[in-house]
Image: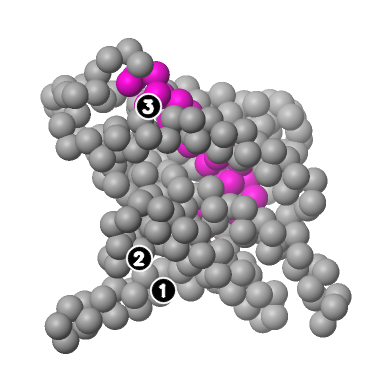
């Protein structure tokens, strides 16, 4: 039992950290109505990693990470600047196109990389069980810096998130703040995908935030309870995957997804009883 706990200690801590930062961004993304931006950005980050590997760098090298960050920041900056007074093309459509292009290129590049199909699977499912304390330390420092930035910009970012009239937010200062939001979001996604995989990052962003929004619109409560649900579901799924020797990413995704439907069912029936 003690050996199991020692082995699971790093992934448990990682689950707590990732659930926290993704819950915060997830509530913003859900409130902004751009649900699929994270899965598109995650795929772009994975594409950047593949390009780095094709250039001859190892997957864990700093060069590959820089290429991945570079691709992600360029795309998400372009997306942030798409916000215009009158949208001729819905942003969700643009996000979908970005995702399809990134996935299509990734599948083509996979044919040129030895074990490319295995790499594609890895980027989708991740493997948080093998996260190291060094990874956790790096993520903690990185996310702490991002947290400090958002702490000072929190009020304005929240106002932009909940703005129903986008034409109110077109000053240079507002554009800069929105750009900071998206760039820091992209950085978090790149680091998260490297450890957790695309699907797990997506479900951690959206599922806890969606389930909590059914019960409360209080911003602080939404973030706290999203964190609790995300962390609990991640740890439970990870433990089940370890005990039964199954993939941890899909196990966590299934648990968090089912949790959303259970809470939705409870909420609907509560309303019916009233």
Name of the residue lying farthest toward the top: 172
Q: Callout 3: helix, strand or loop? A: helix
Assign the N terminus to one quadrant of the image. Answer: bottom right
Which span of residues is magenta-colored?
Answer: 174-201
Residue denoted by label 2: 211
Let me know if residue 272 is in the magenta part: no
Residue at the extreme right of the image, as rendered: 3
Q: Nearer the viewer's eye, disc 3 or disc 1?
A: 3
| Mark 3–mark 1 distance (CA, rounded to whole Å) | 31 Å
Which is more N-terminal, label 1 or label 2? 2
Judged by depth in the image, the label closer to the viewer, 2 or 1, is 2
119 is higher (above) or lower (below) than 53: below
In the rendered structure, find residue 178 and report the number of the disc placed on it.
Answer: 3
Residue 44 visible at all: no
Q: Do labels 2 and 1 touch, CB within 8 Å?
A: yes
Q: Nearer the viewer, residue 21 or 44?
A: 21
Residue 37 x %, y %: 37, 41
| Quadrant of image for the C terminus | bottom left
Percent from the top left, x then y, of residue 52? 66, 29
Q: Secondary structure at mark 1?
A: helix
Q: Which of disc 1 and disc 3 is earlier in sequence?
A: 3
């Amino acid at each position: 039992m003690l050996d199991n706990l020692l082995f699971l200690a790093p992934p448990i801590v990682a689950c707590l950290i990732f659930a926290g930062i993704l819950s915060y961004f997830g509530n913003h993304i859900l409130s902004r109505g751009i649900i699929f931006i994270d899965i598109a950005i995650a795929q772009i980050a994975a594409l950047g990693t593949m390009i780095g590997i094709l250039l001859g760098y190892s997957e864990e090298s700093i060069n590959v990470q820089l290429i991945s960050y570079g691709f992600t920041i360029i795309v998400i900056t372009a997306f942030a600047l798409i916000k215009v007074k009158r949208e001729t093309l819905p942003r969700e459509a643009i996000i979908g196109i970005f995702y399809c292009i990134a996935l299509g290129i990734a599948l083509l590049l996979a044919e040129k990389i030895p074990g490319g199909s295995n790499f594609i699977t890895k980027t989708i499912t991740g493997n948080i069980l093998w996260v190291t304390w060094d990874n956790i330390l790096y993520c903690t420092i990185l996310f702490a810096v991002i947290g400090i930035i958002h702490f000072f910009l929190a009020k304005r970012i929240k106002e932009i998130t909940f703005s129903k009239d986008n034409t109110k937010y077109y000053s240079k200062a507002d554009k800069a703040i929105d750009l900071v939001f998206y760039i820091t979001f992209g950085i978090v996604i790149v680091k998260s995908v490297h450890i957790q995989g695309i699907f797990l990052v997506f479900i951690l962003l959206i599922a806890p935030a969606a389930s909590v929004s059914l019960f409360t619109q209080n911003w602080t409560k939404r973030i706290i309870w999203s964190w609790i649900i995300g962390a609990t579901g991640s740890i439970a799924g990870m433990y089940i995957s370890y005990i039964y020797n199954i993939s941890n990413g899909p196990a966590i995704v299934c648990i968090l997804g089912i949790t959303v439907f259970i809470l939705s069912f409870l909420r609907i029936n509560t309303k019916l009883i009233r």
